[in-house]
Image: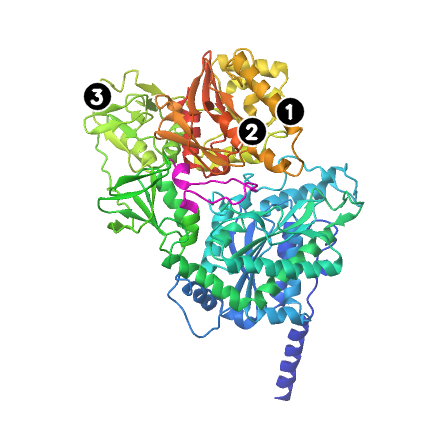
């Protein structure tokens, strides 16, 4: 008995000793604070912490495209960790998202810490290890007090692929000695850089749209917890002093006073810590809270206090000399972050009751009375609603479909006027009275109030326009009967089919065509409307006929198995139309399967390249050859029929340009986007020109000279404000369509383009102006008054036919951030339907 007792005491003391002696990151990882840690070292350290401490628990919530784990770590007292599920359910129940409330656990405040959404801002992940250590450190009595009523959810690296890309590069090109001078290669990151994820998307702009796998998996977990505080840890230019809240204007009008109050509390508390260390910082100057898809705004619109912390460090490598002569090291950067992040946790713990009340009132009050002008949003039945519904599901926004007819009056997104309209079965309906009320309103409210035009990002995102569907915002609640989903009747394919018809009306149409091309199946596309009995084929509609595919065994089964993902497909039993548009006539054009070459590398905008790569690889799963611009001379261009030039600077030689010219004339197609179109501007044989005439050019030059002369009398203080009059940070602009041309098929009556640059060209001569901005155009978001005048009657998308080939000019990027759904269809038209 005595031996057993002694053994138990020994075991207990040994266990206590293990838990009492945690290794710091410096003790665990060689060169911590001097060199970037490998991602596996980060994971190893957190594994060590979970094995050595009872105050931390791991959850793997997903994996990246490159199969790296995505993990969060719950940090709190052992008692709280044993009751995590009850705490989570209680938190959700308090805002109407769960019915599983229990009285066995007290209310806790939930603080979510996100690090390294941008891979090359690596001091975030480095600091995450110090933050975790301090929260778990047995000798840190302060943190133990915070954790009694706090659940910390710590995500040490949101973007492991980008972090690893940057880290491996930095490790490979650095030696034993630091090089703080500006011109060492460790301060000159190579293309595409480590900022972005595998597909070169900016994950900090993807919270609401969730186009990327990392965002989808993370936000699914986030919405299962709904924290009261979310901290997004970043870095910025190495010369910049530290930034912490309060944020800059514009602040979205839906942000509550309790959120603003906590920003002020943080500003005061963090500044006190930084003042004691004589660390430089700034607040309220640069980072606003408006665009809804950031790591600070998305949580804010979900009732949390969402905030950004920014340390100067991008381009700093391991150490760099700043313009003030002082050096900043990795250790400096992670230390500043750790101090700020720990102060956030401390402040949240001390403000627990205030934050919980504000958070719960935020959700409860929004259901009692909508924050915005409108209570209901109605989107007319359209196949593009399939994709919109998927996006709403990812954000847990409730919606339904009309199951009866009715009438209403509301704001029409397409013409910005109030008008009466009919509600019809299968119209999609989103009500403000729902648990995600504020987020739903932010995404659908047509007229966002921009209280400061100096915004950090795009200023409009109206989803009906992004998805190309007719929409209305209604002030009152609608009493129309609704249903949860649209039932689709199962199709029975007959034993003999003359041809299958697949409507061309959303991204799924392009996915189907991609599969058909890859299966070697011949496909035709309708140029004009054609009628076959009860089947009406709209322009762009795909026809897969037995006559075009005589060698396909079991034609009906083979084709129907491919196209079944497009549930609105049908089949026809004859090629004889009732309106003189027979299958074998000129109305149905045989489509060529694209053989795509896309250039990458130095000079090309990483994110714009990434958007196209993601579209090809993930959205439509279509093969593409990607070649570095430096290797273009090694390519036999005639092996391809499509060349994609994403936004960027292409330093082609005269011989290379001539090669492209000849290839186009022989039948090649170039899709040139944004600044890439400058390759063809004012060149012999091409229609692209800034001005339609010599007189227009002279008039523009005269106006610019007059403006410059007037600037001589203006004060310097207002220069920044004056400068933005000629800018578009990101606005929605109405475009008129040539609906008779294949590039416009399926887009609707009007195309609304998300314009993020000031590029403007007069309507082109000797080209097809597919989409152009009309006089008095409708717009959403901030458009500077100077540039607004210049945009009238300018072209946005055009096709320049040259010989047997063509060049497609895209002044705007229709694939921007992967969420502009109607833009995805426009690009699909350009890729597949334009010969």
Residue assigned mark 2: 647
Separation of residues labelled 2 and 1 (CA atoms): 33 Å
Q: Is residue 736 magenta?
A: no
- Residue at 55% in and 70% down: 149
Q: Residues within 10 Å of mark 1 (few under 14, many from 20)?
A: few
Separation of residues labelled 3 and 1 (CA atoms): 65 Å
User: Does residue 310 show up?
Assistant: yes
Q: Which residues are magenta?
A: 443-468
Q: Is residue 581 above or below residue 347?
A: above
Residue assigned mark 1: 709
Q: Residues within 10 Å of mark 3 (few under 14, many from 20)?
A: some
Give the mark toward the camera: 2 or 3: 2
**Marks 2 and 1 in Cβ contact (< 8 Å):** no
Question: Viewed as shown, does residue 535 lie left or right of 631?
Answer: left
- Residue at 45% in and 23% down: 793
Residue 256 placement (x, y as % from top left): 49, 57
> What secondary structure is found at the residue carrying circle 1?
helix
């Amino acid at each position: 008995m005595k031996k057993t007792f002694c053994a138990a005491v020994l075991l207990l003391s040994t266990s206590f000793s293990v838990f009492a002696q945690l290794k710091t990151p410096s003790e665990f990882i060689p060169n911590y604070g001097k060199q970037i840690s490998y991602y596996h070292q980060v994971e190893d350290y957190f594994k060590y912490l979970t094995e050595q401490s009872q105050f931390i628990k791991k959850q793997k919530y997903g994996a990246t495209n490159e199969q790296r784990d995505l993990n969060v770590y719950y940090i709190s007292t052992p008692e709280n960790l044993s009751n995590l599920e009850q705490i989570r359910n209680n938190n959700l129940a308090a805002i109407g998202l769960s019915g599983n409330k229990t009285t066995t656990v007290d209310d806790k405040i939930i603080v979510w810490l996100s690090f390294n959404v941008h891979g090359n801002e690596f001091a975030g992940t480095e600091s995450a290890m110090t933050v975790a250590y301090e929260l778990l450190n047995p000798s840190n009595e302060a943190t133990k007090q915070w954790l009694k009523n706090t659940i910390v959810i710590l995500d040490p690296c949101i973007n492991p692929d980008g972090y690893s890309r940057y880290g491996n590069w930095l490790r490979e090109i650095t030696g034993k000695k630091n090089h703080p001078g500006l011109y060492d290669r460790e301060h000159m990151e190579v293309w595409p850089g480590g900022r972005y994820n595998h597909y070169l998307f900016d994950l900090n702009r993807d919270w609401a749209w969730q186009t990327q796998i990392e965002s989808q998996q993370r936000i699914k977990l986030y919405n299962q917890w709904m924290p009261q505080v979310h901290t997004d840890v970043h870095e910025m230019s190495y010369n910049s002093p530290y930034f912490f809240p309060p944020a800059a204007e514009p602040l979205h009008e839906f942000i509550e006073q309790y959120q603003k109050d906590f920003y002020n509390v943080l500003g005061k508390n963090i500044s006190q810590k930084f003042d004691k260390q004589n660390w430089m910082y700034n607040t309220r100057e640069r980072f606003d809270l408006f665009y809804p898809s950031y790591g600070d705004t998305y949580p804010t619109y979900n009732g949390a206090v969402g905030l950004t912390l920014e340390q100067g460090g991008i381009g700093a490598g391991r150490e760099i000399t700043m313009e003030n002569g002082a050096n900043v090291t990795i250790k400096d950067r992670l230390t500043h972050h750790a101090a700020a992040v720990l102060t956030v946790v401390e402040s949240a713990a001390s403000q627990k009751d205030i934050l919980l009340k504000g958070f719960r009132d935020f959700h409860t009050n929004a259901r009692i009375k909508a924050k915005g002008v409108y209570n209901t949003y109605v989107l007319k039945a359209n196949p593009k609603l399939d994709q919109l519904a998927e996006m709403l599901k990812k954000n847990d926004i409730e919606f339904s479909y009309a199951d009866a007819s009715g009438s209403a009056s509301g704001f029409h997104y397409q013409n910005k006027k109030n008008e009466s309209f009919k509600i019809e079965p299968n119209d999609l309906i989103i009500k403000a009275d729902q648990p995600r009320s504020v987020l739903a309103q932010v995404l659908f409210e047509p007229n966002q109030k921009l209280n400061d035009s100096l915004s950090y990002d795009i200023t409009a995102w109206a989803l009906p326009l992004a998805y190309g569907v007719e929409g209305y915002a209604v002030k009152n609640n609608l009493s129309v009967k609704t249903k949860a989903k649209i039932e689709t009747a199962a199709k029975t394919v007959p034993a003999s089919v003359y041809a299958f018809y697949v409507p061309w009306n959303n991204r799924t149409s392009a996915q189907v065509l991609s599969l058909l091309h890859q299966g070697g199946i011949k496909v035709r596309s309708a140029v004009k409307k054609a009628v076959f009995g009860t089947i009406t084929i709209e322009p762009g509609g795909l026809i897969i006929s037995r006559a075009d595919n005589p060698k396909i065994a079991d034609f009906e089964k083979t084709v129907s198995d491919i196209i079944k993902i497009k549930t609105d497909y049908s089949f026809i039993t004859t090629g004889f139309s009732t309106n003189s548009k027979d299958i074998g006539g000129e109305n149905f054009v045989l489509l060529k399967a694209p053989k795509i070459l896309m250039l990458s590398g130095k000079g090309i905008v990483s994110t714009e390249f990434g958007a196209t790569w993601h579209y090809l690889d993930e959205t439509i799963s279509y093969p593409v050859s990607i070649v570095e611009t430096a290797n273009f001379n090694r390519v036999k261009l005639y092996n391809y029929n499509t060349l994609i030039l994403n936004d960027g600077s292409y330093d082609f030689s005269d011989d290379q340009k001539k090669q492209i010219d000849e290839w186009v004339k022989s039948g090649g197609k170039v899709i040139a986007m944004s600044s890439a179109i400058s390759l063809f501007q004012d060149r012999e044989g091409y229609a692209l020109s800034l001005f339609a005439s010599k007189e227009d050019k002279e008039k523009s030059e005269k106006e610019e000279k007059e403006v410059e002369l007037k600037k001589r009398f203006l004060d310097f203080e207002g220069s920044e404000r004056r400068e933005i009059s000629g800018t578009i940070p990101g606005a929605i602009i109405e475009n008129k369509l040539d609906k008779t041309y294949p590039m416009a098929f399926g887009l609707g009556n009007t195309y609304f383009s998300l314009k993020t640059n000031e590029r403007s060209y007069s309507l082109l001569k000797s080209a097809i102006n597919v989409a152009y901005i009309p006089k008095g155009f409708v717009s959403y978001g901030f458009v500077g008054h100077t540039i607004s005048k210049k945009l009238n009657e300018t072209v946005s998308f055009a096709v320049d036919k040259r010989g047997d080939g063509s060049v497609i000019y895209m002044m705007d990027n229709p694939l921007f951030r992967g969420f502009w759904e109607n833009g995805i269809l426009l690009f699909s038209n350009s890729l597949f339907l334009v010969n």
